[in-house]
Image (cartoon, coloured by chain):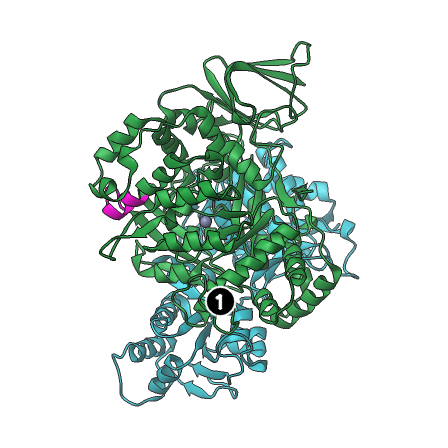
């Protein structure tokens, strides 16, 4: 059961007491990362809610590009299996989607369900070409102007012959269009433009967006945050009401501005820790831990390897349960992140056993 | 521990009970007066004592509900956390839902739309709703696996086995179909669908899909009848879809969701709608095997959430504010469209009147259950106000007087004198929904019932009376006192005890692996995914 305080190996009780002391002394603690299984995310919210901490996530850049566009103008979306099974036209925006496993699945298959079943699948690119793309629009001026130009063609505002015009014509003539993008790469305005052009296309055919999966558990955090607090993440509990504020509760900003005075980094799904973590008193609850990760380090089980846990399933686009893998660490050796967080909450909030 | 609730007006229509008396409770159950001294006496003088309320149709968990929170972060107000729970006053959150229902005297609530592909997420969210027992209905009727099986002419047994597998895997309490075939048709370009229209690519119709599910639910002896969301929700002439669907059930048990949204007859000029409440009520009276819930409209801002993506796409341009989300999911998906039922607006006023009219004309309140289809007709927090309007003709007339004349011109509401009794309210909100769900242990106060009990101060202001119960017991434990939560305990999730066929499981595993890249294992809802024991098995009918 590896745990360290200031680099020195110690037992779990000592490490938890040290972590509780560190957090208890803080006026504005932050809990960041949340790259973890659902039970640990829930436990982190419970801790934050009871001690007045704020919460931030590892994949915030992409998450806010998505959520910002969603809450301003809505969306029209599909799922990985639906795009693989139904799309006769796939537009890949930017470079990032080309390296995902999902794009590989799309490349391998043809439409097999719905009205495009049996048709060829036209693969097109905006911004970054790939050998598999039948048509590439370079977008030298950047992705956002490239998307805006495409939308103008689709709306009939522009008509002169160009690769963009060809692309617009192909999309409009297709039966089921999927637009693949990485939210962090295209940014909030990019997401909004993609949603706008997808919605426009639905006046005459079917078209949907599909964000490619990121490398974080943010897609598990967002639903848990929404059902727990009624709001999206980056939430602060300093005033005893959940306050959603993507700018104010950006952990990196809070540390840089000197607002945060302690941090708990949660990454039971191993992920590189941010540079700012070493600048304030910190606790790390991490899989594959090393002694120098923070002032107090507690190694926790990696979900789906050392322990069972619910994680975002990229292949499915859903939360699914992953049992411990045979040959992983013995479960008893590593506590779950949720159990450590729950003990911390007991210490700090004087919580009775019966409370939720 | 032996408790007695003493001297209240005990209202239990299932025992023809309405009079001052006692209710005895031991070990979480209602018991006969045992002839010994109680350990605890709860004084209920001046109060009304009923079974805990049972909700059959309220969107309280799942992907659409989550999307609605992200789309409209300001729909609900959050207040400072109370003692004992950090999130109970976070507007729209799971804990807020549990606490708000419990304060109203409800002790059970069912989420009616759980897509099997997202069962685990929905079940995790439901499990975080404190205080109440919960359940979810497994949605089928648009999934390629089922439609292919029907297209290929496989028999009723195959459908039955697939339904059983889906319910067992998702741990549902019953089965629902939502505009059967409509989501599939939408993806293939359709914009409208009626009972006998062809579903593109499958050569099927809503009639055939729904009929096969009706048979499967009966064959499996699922206690809750098939829960049906018909075609053409909210459109003038939807009453024809309702009646055609009832006829298509051919005497099989059927539950109609949010019937108010179908009680829209076309006006003579063909341009608008008028109340078809009488027609709907007559059909229900003539068909004892049929039930409905209302989907009452209340005035104000809300958000509509539905797996009926065909309908939600059709309604997208009415979004207010002007933003909406439509997810063409693995089967149904979902549509989230904000909506304002304009106070005193002619359309919303008529919708409001039609829902009340159905309840007030109802020959059998146990079969015409109160819902707002939360949040589609409005929030469930409006139940006390709706009960007030049902029980108090004067209150109703005062409200009607503020509304446009269309209420009198196109509905019969203003002429209705009926006032609901407390017994009828108990039928509408307790015994009716519990019977409908097949939960024999609740919805009444007879010996052997689960001690889920609501005690209200008798108050002619029924809105106040039913908003904040004086006392609520869950399994005999006080959870609400004087309208405030006093004990943050967790309820259970009710799931149907159903065996699935091994051959169908193998076959489905192959199908899912081929389509999703991952097999049946990734669709399960295992106990280990939950931090505490969560599920309670509900038996099938014998
Ligand atoms: Zn509904």
Q: Position of residue B225 (x, y in %)?
A: 56, 47
In the image: residue B180, left or right of residue B278: right
Is A92 situated above or below B286?
Answer: below
**Front-most of residues A299 and B95:** B95
In the image: residue B372, left or right of residue B438: left
Residue drawn at 65 percent across, 32 percent down: A353
Residue B343 is one of the magenta-drawn residues: yes
Q: Position of residue B80 (x, y in %)?
A: 43, 35
Q: Position of residue A26 (x, y in %)?
A: 52, 41
Rendered hue of chain A is cyan
In the image: residue A152, left or right of residue A307: left
Residue drawn at 67 percent across, 60 percent down: B157
Rendered hue of chain B is green
Local packing at callout 1 (Cα closer than 10 Å; few below 14, some 14-19, many 20+) is many
Residue A55 visible (yes or no): no
Residue B26 visible (yes or no): yes
Is B484 situated above or below A73?
Answer: above
- In which chain is the residue bearing label 1? B
Q: Which residues are magenta?
A: B342-351
Location of mark 1 (residue): B184
Numbered disc 1: secondary structure: helix
Main SS of the magenta part reads: helix
**Front-most of residues B106 and B389:** B389
All told, the count of numbered labels is: 1
Which corner quadrant of the image does residue B350 belong to? top left
Q: Position of residue A187 (x, y in %)?
A: 41, 67
Residue B486 is one of the magenta-drawn residues: no
């Amino acid at each position: 059961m590896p745990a360290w305080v200031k680099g020195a190996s110690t037992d779990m009780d000592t490490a938890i007491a040290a972590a509780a002391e560190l957090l208890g002394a803080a006026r504005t603690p932050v809990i960041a990362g949340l790259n973890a299984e659902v039970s640990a995310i829930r436990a982190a919210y419970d801790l934050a809610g009871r001690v007045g901490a704020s919460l931030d996530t590892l994949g915030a850049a992409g998450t806010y590009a998505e959520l910002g566009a969603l809450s301003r103008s809505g969306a029209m979306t599909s799922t990985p299996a639906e795009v693989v099974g139904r799309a006769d036209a796939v537009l890949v925006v930017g470079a990032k989607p080309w390296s995902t496993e999902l794009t590989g699945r799309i490349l391998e298959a043809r439409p097999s369900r719905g009205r495009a079943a049996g048709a060829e699948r036209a693969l097109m690119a905006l911004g970054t070409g790939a050998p598999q793309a039948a048509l590439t629009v370079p977008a030298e001026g950047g992705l956002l102007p490239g998307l805006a130009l495409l939308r103008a063609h689709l709306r009939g505002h522009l008509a002169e012959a160009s690769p963009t015009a060809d692309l617009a014509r192909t999309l409009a003539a297709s039966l089921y269009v999927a637009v693949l993008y990485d939210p962090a790469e295209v940014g909030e305005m990019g997401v909004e433009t993609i949603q706008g052009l997808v919605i426009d296309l639905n006046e005459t055919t079917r078209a949907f967006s599909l964000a490619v999966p990121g490398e974080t558990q943010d897609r598990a955090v967002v639903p848990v945050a929404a059902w727990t607090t009624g709001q999206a993440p980056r939430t602060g509990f300093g005033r005893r009401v959940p306050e959603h504020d993507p700018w104010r509760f950006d952990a990196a900003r809070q540390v840089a501005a000197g607002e945060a005075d302690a941090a708990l980094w949660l990454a039971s799904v191993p992920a590189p820790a941010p540079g700012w973590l070493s600048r304030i008193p910190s606790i790390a609850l991490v899989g594959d831990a090393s002694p120098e990760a923070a002032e107090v380090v507690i190694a926790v089980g990696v979900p789906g390897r050392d322990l069972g846990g619910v994680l975002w399933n990229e292949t499915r686009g859903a939360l699914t349960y992953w049992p411990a893998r045979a040959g992983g660490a013995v479960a008893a050796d590593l506590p779950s992140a949720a159990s450590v967080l729950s003990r911390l909450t007991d210490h700090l909030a004087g919580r009775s056993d019966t409370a939720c | 521990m032996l408790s007695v609730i003493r001297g209240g007006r005990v209202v239990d229509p299932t025992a023809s009970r309405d009079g001052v008396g006692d209710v005895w409770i031991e070990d979480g159950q209602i018991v006969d007066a045992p002839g010994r001294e109680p350990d605890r006496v709860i004084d209920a003088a001046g109060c009304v004592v009923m079974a805990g309320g049972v909700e059959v149709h309220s969107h309280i968990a799942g992907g659409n509900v989550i999307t609605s929170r992200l789309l409209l972060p300001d729909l609900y107000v959050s207040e400072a956390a109370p003692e004992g729970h950090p999130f109970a006053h976070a507007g729209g959150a799971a804990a807020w839902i549990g606490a708000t229902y419990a304060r109203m005297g409800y002790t059970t609530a069912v989420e009616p739309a759980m897509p099997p592909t997202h069962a685990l997420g929905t079940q995790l969210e439901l499990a975080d709703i404190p205080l109440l027992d919960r359940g979810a209905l497994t949605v089928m009727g648009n999934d390629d696996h089922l439609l292919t099986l029907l297209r290929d002419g496989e028999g009723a047994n195959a459908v039955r086995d697939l339904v059983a597998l889906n319910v067992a895997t998702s741990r549902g309490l019953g089965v629902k179909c939502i505009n059967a075939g409509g989501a599939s048709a939408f993806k293939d370009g359709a914009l409208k669908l009626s009972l006998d229209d062809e579903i593109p690519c499958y050569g099927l119709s809503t009639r055939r899909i729904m009929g096969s599910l009706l048979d499967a639910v009966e064959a499996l002896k699922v206690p809750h009848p098939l829960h049906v969301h018909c075609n053409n929700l909210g459109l003038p002439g939807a009453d024809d879809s309702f009646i055609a669907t009832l006829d298509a059930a051919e005497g099989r048990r059927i539950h109609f969701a949010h019937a108010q949204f179908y009680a829209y007859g076309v006006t003579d000029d063909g341009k608008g709608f008028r109340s078809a409440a009488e027609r709907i009520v007559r059909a229900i009276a003539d068909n004892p095997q049929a039930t409905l819930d209302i989907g009452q409209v209340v005035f104000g801002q809300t958000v509509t959430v539905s797996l009926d993506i065909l309908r939600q796409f059709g309604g997208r341009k009415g979004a207010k504010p002007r933003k909406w989300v439509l997810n063409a999911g693995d089967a149904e998906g979902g549509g989230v469209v904000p909506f304002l039922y304009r106070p005193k607006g002619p359309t919303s006023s008529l919708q409001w009147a039609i829902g009340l009219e159905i309840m007030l004309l109802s020959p059998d309140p146990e079969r015409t259950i109160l819902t707002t289809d939360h949040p589609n007709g409005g929030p469930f927090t409006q139940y006390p106000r709706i009960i007030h309007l049902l029980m108090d003709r004067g209150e109703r007339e005062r409200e009607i007087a503020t509304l446009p004349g269309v209420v009198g011109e196109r509905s019969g509401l203003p002429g209705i004198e009926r006032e609901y009794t407390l017994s009828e309210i108990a039928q509408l909100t307790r015994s009716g929904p519990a019977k409908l769900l097949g939960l024999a242990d609740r919805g009444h106060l007879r010996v052997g019932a689960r001690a889920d009990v609501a005690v209200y101060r008798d108050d002619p202001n029924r809105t106040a009376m039913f908003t904040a119960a004086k006392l609520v017991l869950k399994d005999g434990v006080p959870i609400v006192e004087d309208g405030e939560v006093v004990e943050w305990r967790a309820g259970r999730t009710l799931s149907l005890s159903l065996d699935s066929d091994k051959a169908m499981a193998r076959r489905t595993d192959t199908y899912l692996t081929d389509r999703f890249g991952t097999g049946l294992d990734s669709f399960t809802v295992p106990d280990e995914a939950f931090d505490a024991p969560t599920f309670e098995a509900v038996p099938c009918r014998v």
